[in-house]
Amino acid sequence: MESGVSSVINLTEVAKREKEEFGKKVSELIIEFGAENLLACMQCGACASVCPLARVGFEWYNKKLIKAILIGMKEELLDDPTPWACVACNRCTEICPRQVAPFEVMFAMRRLMVEEFAIPTLAIEGIRSLYEHGHAVYMTGREARKKVGLPEKPPTTDSDEKALQDLRTILRNTKLAELGLIPME
Amino acid sequence: MISETVKEEKKLKFGLFLGCNISFNRPDVEQAMRKIFPALGVEIDDLVGQSCCPTWGTMPSIDIVGWCAVAARNLCLGEEKGIDLMTACNSCYGSLNEARHKMLKNPEIMSKVNEILAKIGKKYEGKAKCRHVAWVLYKDVGLEKIKESIKYSLDGITVAVQPGCHFLWPSEVYPDKEEDPFNPKVLRELCEALGADAPYYTRLIDCCGMGALRSTDPEKSFILVREKLECIKEEIDADLIVTTCSSCLIQLDDAQEKLRKEGKINFSIPVLHYVQLLAICMGFDPQQVAGICVTPRDEIIKRILEGGKR
């Protein structure tokens, strides 16, 4: 930049660069990933008033996340754990006067983060366990089942090899296989 | 002469959808269901080959069609037999019904799901749904039959009810709905049918902090469970916490012990799933139907068995 000349941001250039770097706008991606009614949000804050995450101090709770997406933020959001803390309780969906379903925005954000590999290790472990055993929560110890007088194996994929193979076939035909998050032989 | 028509009772039959936590962490809840339902005239099908619902941190976080496909395979296991599923886990109840709602609302999702299911020779028609065991007890079995079935009552016992999030919201996707989802009554009435007092308390509908919140940030999760427990203690001094969710059960039971060890609370309130409490009141072996816990239950069970004989 030449000295004495104030910096002028060429918006056309920025827009072009962003298009090249990120492809679609964040809001378009979020809508595509399931938050169909994103644009109906009027930032009233009803969702935040009932959100457990907002109450315990997570940074990007529902209302704030929606605003960030609407103004095109993306990089700042990718490192934040908030969407992964969402308990999917859907208080927000119930109370929203505009049928935005903020829960869908939270989970669409998760899906976007997964594409960028911004996914917590614990989530990957759960997915791996789902593929391996048919159960996201799986325990090899069976003392508890024996203690209460039940067979060691529950009547699930845990005791039904054909069902487990069926489930794996399903998973191999979903987006999970395209992402390559876990080995899927 | 016209012969007297015999009132034919509709045979109730459901596929017992267990979910991961009940299968492996809290099988006493499974055993409680296996005891109470046949005794109440509800036949159980094992839904052999069922899997994880799928829970929120797995396929729902990856892709909607993939989420629905895993859920649909589970729902198919009931649909093929012409029965609905029922579960004692709110997460399973939420995930399966959210998925079904998406498939029914959006034919494109349904057809993509069925393309995937075709590879394992299945097709989901959208008929089978997942009911919640508490609703089956409330609506299908009925409070009167529950009252008749119990050997021990909870007279003089105060319970704090914890319906849990996915018992209530989003009401649009569930087969059964509270009149006011922000002022739930069903679990309170179910507990009252056993003779207990089940008063309102300020944090009755608050989240317990389990699930993704606890795995992401245990400290923040414990803020919620602590507030809830303190409210229960201070406002209604409950003898017992009763929930309809296996995740709430684990959190309230387990985190309570952690809070005690850290010196953050100085009281102990036993926690039971409603099906466990009902099983105890019906006279089933507490070791089998309520034998797994962190926060001790012995005293309250003794009190029920000694004091509440009808």
Image (cartoon, grey):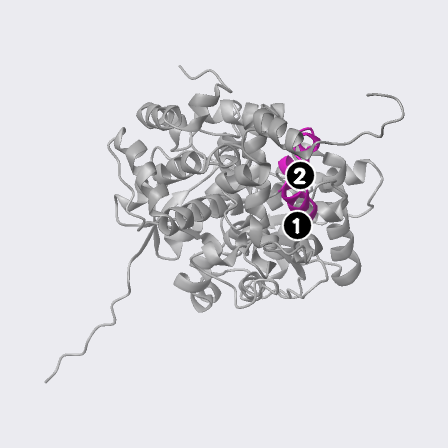
* Same subunit, tags 1 and 2: yes
Residue at which label 2 appears? B213
Q: Is residue A68 magenta?
A: yes
Residue at which label 1 appears? B207
Q: What x and y, as percent, mark residue B65?
A: 41, 37
Kind of residue at badge 2 = Leu
Residue that extends furthest to the bottom in the rendered view of this protein = B1
Q: What x and y, as percent, mark residue B161?
A: 63, 57
Do the numbered discs 1 and 2 sit on residues whose CB atoms are within 8 Å? yes
Q: Chain of mark 1?
A: B
Residue that extends furthest to the left in the rendered view of this protein = B1
**Quarter residue A22 falls in:** top right
The mark nearer the N terminus, 1 or 2, is 1
Instruction: Identify which residue, B98 or A13, lies in the foreground.
Output: A13
User: Which contiguous range is marked in magenta?
Assistant: A63-86
Identify the secondary structure beneath mark 1: loop
Identify the secondary structure beneath mark 2: helix
Asked if residue A1 is positioned above or below residue B139 in the image, the reply reads above
Query: Can the viewer see residue B247?
Result: yes
At 78% across and 40% down in the image, what residue appears? B259
Asked if residue B146 is positioned above or below residue B68 in the image, the reply reads below
Task: Specify the quadrant that holds the C terminus of chain B.
Answer: bottom right
Instruction: Identify which residue, A167 or B142, lies in the foreground.
Output: A167
- Secondary structure mostly seen in magenta is helix
Instruction: Identify which residue, B4 or B25, lies in the foreground.
Output: B25
Q: Is residue B150 left or right of residue B83?
A: right
Q: Is residue A179 magenta?
A: no
